[in-house]
Image: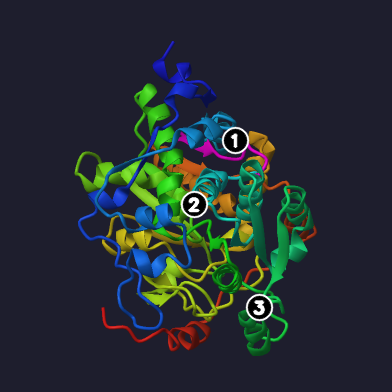
Amino acid sequence: MSVEKTIPYKIYLSEDEIPKQWYNVRADMKNKPAPLLNPETLKPMGFEDLRPVFCDELIKQELDDTTPYIDIPQEIQDFYKMYRPSPLVRAYCLEKALGTPAKIYYKFEGNNTSGSHKLNSAIVQAYYAKQQGLKGVTTETGAGQWGTALSMATAYLGIDCKVYMVKVSYEQKPFRREVMRTYGASVTPSPSMDTEIGKKINAEHPGTTGSLGCAISEAVEVATKTEGYRYVLGSVLNQVLLHQTVIGLEAKAALDKYGITPDIIIGCAGGGSNLGGLISPFMGEKLRGEKDYRIVAVEPASCPSFTRGKFAYDFCDTGMVCPLAKMYTLGSNFIPSANHAGGLRYHGMSPILSQLYHDGYMEAITAEQTAVFEAAQRFARVEGILPAPESSHAIKAAIDEALKCKETGEEKTILFGLTGTGYFDMVAYQKFNDGDMTDYIPTDAELEESFARLPKVND
């Protein structure tokens, strides 16, 4: 029997092999992400500048560009054991259906109630909020996975949670909303009329379906105006990518057990949390010159931050109250179309990933919505998991790469991230099944209008 046939469908690590440290890829980056800037002074922000918004310990992690490994608190390790380690799955059935010589693996993060990878960071941020003696936290959520994860974490730790959910997702995904409420969170559609920023956005964009940038603005306003609260977020910033490295560390450990080295690593990209978490330990090897990998980010054609954005300082939120980050951005004023991959509807990209992309360590491609759901359906019918629309961008790219191998006869090994399940996304699947789904790609004129409003910053 060949060694290849001894590889199981699912590779599990033991509880003892769950990572005990997060990996900070910034320590190995020659060009570090640019510092966050104060929105009023345009000066780099330090610890004291960020204290009104974020928890103290999370600020330390946000600003740490040099420590390669950061210890995971024991209470977090114990919580992780409820749903980690997550399986690394060999997609034998998909390989067979495609008739490809490629070997396809996916790291599945949907085996918890939130249905996604977001719980990896939610529990950490809630933990540090409680350690600091705070009453509660505020946040935004797009498709709802982050809000669900955070409501679970805050319920577990006994602190309050206020969620501002992008309006289009609030309406499209009522069951995700109700899961949050079941865990004790308050959920408000954004932009709302409850905040000054929400009122302003509604006045400037009547009838808007909202965006993550809008929801961030509202959550930050409430956090800074409510005593005993801080703002936490599910993507983009350095601290979040740090916590999510448990994904890549587990994936790499599982692959190493069987002597498997991926040729191509693929992840969907919205703000960057799951992509950064998956690729970080592999990227570290690449940065150190130890190994080489082809790393591919897949973003929606309707919100193409990497592929059509500008690498520039921009506000992280539509209301322009958050720090400025240097990232690939479509402009904080850009409101993406109401596509069904709500978690990818963000105007900017993680500063870490933006710098790595700018320096040529990874590539990016786009996918249109209907093609993404075609890939999701194809995957679901053979692999038995209904994937989230966000993850399905990575599935499409993995299928395309596997079919290229079929044409060339190359036996490449492909790893992609399956960030979660799509069981709360049935309105989207209904639209696809009924033939009512459409594709939207912003015009150059629309993007240029948004770029014209980027803040003027001298790097």
- Where residue 375 sits in the image (x, y, percent)? 61, 49
Q: Residue at x 70, y 76 (%)?
A: 192
* Circle count: 3
Judged from this view, the residue extending furthest toward the top is 1
Q: Nearer the viewer, mark 2 or mark 3?
A: 2
Can the viewer see residue 265 in this picture?
A: no
Q: Assess whether residue 108 is covered by the magenta stretch.
A: yes
- The mark found on residue 195 in the picture is 3
Query: Magenta residues?
Result: 101-114
Residue 253 position by quadrant: top left
Is residue 64 toward the left or the right of residue 159 in the image?
Answer: left
**Which residue is tagged 1?**
97
Secondary structure, mark 3, is loop
Is residue 264 toward the left or the right of residue 400 in the image?
Answer: left
Secondary structure, mark 2, is loop
Q: Residue at x 39, y 46 (%)?
A: 279
Is residue 431 toward the left or the right of residue 140 in the image?
Answer: right
Work out how far the residue at label 1 is from the one at label 3, CA to CA, in angstroms. Answer: 51 Å
- Where residue 223 sits in the image (x, y, percent)? 57, 67
Is the residue marked by circle 1 packed among few (<14), some (14-19), or many (20+) residues within 10 Å? few
Taking depth in this image into account, of 320 and 60 the one nearest to the observer is 60
- Where residue 139 sits in the image (x, y, percent)? 59, 62
**Which residue is tagged 2?**
132
Q: Assess whether residue 385 is covered by the magenta stretch.
A: no
**Do the residues under discs 1 and 3 have CB atoms within 8 angstroms?**
no
Quarter of the C terminus within the rendering: bottom left
Residue 203 position by quadrant: bottom right
